[in-house]
Amino acid sequence: MESVNAIGRRKAAVARVYVSEGKGNITINNRDYREYFGADTLQYVVTQPLMVLNASDKYDIRVNLEGGGVKGQAEALRLGIARALILIDPENKPVLKANGFVTRDPREVERKKPGRPKARKRFQFSKR
């Protein structure tokens, strides 16, 4: 099996994922994923698709991650890994979809409007 490419996005984060057969190493921007994501919850989010398919030690994953914050990056990576696993074996899709790993979260930051302090917030109203 040659390398499989997939892209995952969440908010402002973009994860370009390259999956190849290996021993289960996940490398993000040339660093181990445990070092890159210090929090255990984020490490768990990243490995969810692999755990569901019992494929934690079957693939080596190389990732270019940029943009956004740590949580957005972790969820973008989860989507990218799920998409790559579907490209490798389309029979994985129903399991991953049932766990909610295939759906791209469409929520983005709303733009700031002119004449307001933030996107929806208004300046304090003064009657007189």
Image (spheres, helix red, strand yellow):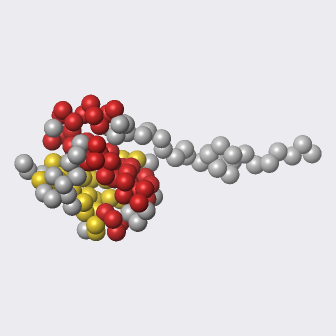
Residue lying farthest left? 1
Tell whether 118 sits left or right of 126. Answer: left
Horizontally, residue 113 falls left or right of residue 4, namely right
Q: Residue at x 29, y 37 (%)?
A: 96
Q: Residue at x 41, y 60 (%)?
A: 40
Task: Evaluate whether residue 110 shows in this view.
Answer: yes
| Viewer-proximal residue among 116 and 100 | 100
From the viewer's perspective, is 78 left or right of 90? Answer: right
Name the residue: 34% across, 53% down: 46
The location of residue 100, given as percent across then percent down, is: 37, 37
Q: Can I make out residue 68 in this image?
A: no
Q: Residue furthest front?
A: 54
Q: Is residue 94 above or below residue 65?
A: above
Depth order, front residue of 18/42: 42
Residue 34 position, x and y percent, is 33, 65
Where the C terminus falls, by quadrant? Answer: top right
Query: Quadrant location of residue 25?
Result: bottom left
Percent x, y of residue 82: 27, 43
- Residue 56 place in picture, x, y as percent: 22, 52
